[in-house]
Amino acid sequence: MTDIRQTLESAVEAHRAGKLAEAEKLYKQVLAADQNHVDAWRLLGVVASQVGKFEIAVQLIGRAVQIRPDLPEGWTDLAEALTGMGKLEDAKVAYEKAIAIRPTFAGARANLGEVLNKLGRTEEAMACWREAARLDPKLPEPPYNMGGVLFAQGKPDEAAEYFRRAIEVQPGFSPAHNNLGAVLWSQGKRKEASECFCRAVELNPKYAEAWNNLGSVWDEGGKHEEAMECWTKAIALRPGYAEAHNNLGVALEKRGARAAAIKEWQEASRLRPDWEVPKYYLAAAMASDAPAPTGPPAEYVAKLFDEYADKFDQHLLGTLEYRVPDLLVAAVKRAGASRFEEVMDLGCGTGLCGEKFRPMAGRMVGVDLSTRMIEKARQRGIYDELMVGGLAEALRGREGDVDLVLAGDVLGYVGDLSELFRAAQGAMRQGGLFAFSVEKPSEKEGEGLVLRRTRRFAHSKSYVERTAREAGMEVVEMSEAVIRLDDQKPIEGMIVVVRRR
């Protein structure tokens, strides 16, 4: 009996040290001596779970709970293995059994909350986490998990409060530092976010997600070399990390290493075949026999402009010499109109275009995919209504109500205009106007819809005319103009006004 106890102690010591093969061997030695040793069955199953052999883990831990059905730890370990298999309902039942045996088992309640959240039962999950935090205020996971739910619900201030609470409970809990950084980054607090990500990787140098996030913040702040080092570390730690491969690809392209960038995007696409963003980068970066996408992923556009929001006005008006709002005002006036009761500003951004049209509008609505852009537009105080969402979707809710639709330097991030034009036609009153700008393809790029290496679309004159006509609108104004600069080079475009027939 003494030998069995000593062998088990050695197994547990090896297990805690991460020597899983050694621990497995010793647990089996215990079972060879005692086939009914509950802890050996259970902990052998935990080893199997830790290496991803969840089905085997369920069998091993299942044997333990058969022998000792009143052991709550056995049911929680079984629940974790079932979760790994994706059997969430079974895992829920196992956690509930552990709690029934020991109602004060805070860890089981916290884990049950995670399962309920995965099942979409968010309110029940939050209740579990609140009770777990009450039972054991020293557990960091309940406030951490509640912060995650609140962030996903678009409540960043409340989320940050819970992540800070998790850090107060356990200052070395690196996931809370990482997620607090993500919240602060979403609020435009770049310096504070970078400090959180730095703290996360300091606490856990093997934290791939935190390295990836730190890279994004540093890249945005101009620390491009440091950012590339971060993404390289993230990939070394987790070779299958598609997001880090994608980010590294963008950085390599900025350095002119397009072939290397393409390899990173190809790897990201291989790792996550359903992810459209790296596929979009690839389509813009390389010629392909495959059909080009007809539009960018909404995720790409929203992220691009969320990160651009704080410097948008200064960069657009100063560096890029943005002229579209003034050009649109002049074109609309040439079309013979100067007053509009209802105006829809599509892709309104921070409100640069809307500000120019405010004196001509009775009521003005702005819509944008970027939450951060909408926040900036709200500060301008020129819109009667602001919406976060897709452009065509916003128009479809306004059948026959709109006098003027605007899209200033937006359609390059839309691509195929057929759906948007139909939605605009349906939203406008008879004789209503749609004023917009497009980039014009070069002679080399040809006619039609063209995806450029800038990852923006260009639209030819014939394409615009045909698509407007098919949507029930006629062109009343179309003029060529330099709409802004890009890399200190003029971008040739067209200012267009169409009317609903």
Image (spheres, helix red, strand yellow):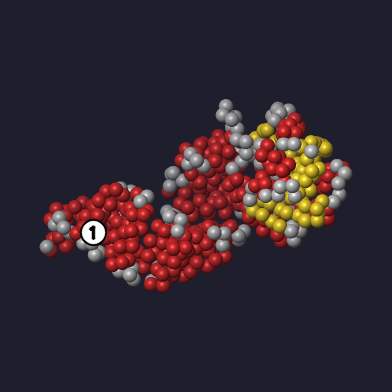
Where's residue 389, x and y in %?
A: 63, 50
> Dot 1: what SS?
helix
Q: Is residue 279 visible?
A: yes
Q: Residue at x 46, y 64 (%)?
A: 126
Residue at horizontal 66%, vertical 39%? Answer: 419
The residue that appears at 27% across and 48% down in the rendered structure is 56
Left of 400 or right of it: where is 58? left
Asked if 478 appears above or below 119 in the picture, the reply is above
Asked whether residue 84 appears in the rendered view, the answer is no
| Residue 12, x across and y down, in percent | 24, 60
Q: Position of residue 286 (x, y in %)?
A: 59, 32
Q: Name which quarter of the figure residue 15 lies in.
A: bottom left
Pointer 1 local density, CA inside 10 Å: few below 14, some 14–19, many at least 20: many
State which quarter of the image contains the C terminus: top right
Mark 1 highlights which residue?
65
The amino acid type, in three-letter code, at marker 1 is Val
Horizontal side of residue 457 vs 244, given as left or right: right
Residue 397: give x, y in percent of width and height: 67, 49
- Using residue 258 as the reference point, say whether residue 459 is left or right of it: right
Looking at this view, is 22 or 64 the one in front?
64
Counting the numbered discs, the total is 1
Horizontal placement of 119 versus 308: left or right? Answer: left
Front residue of 127 and 382? 127
At horizontal 34% and vertical 71% (from top left) the residue drawn is: 104
Q: Quadrant of the N terminus?
A: bottom left
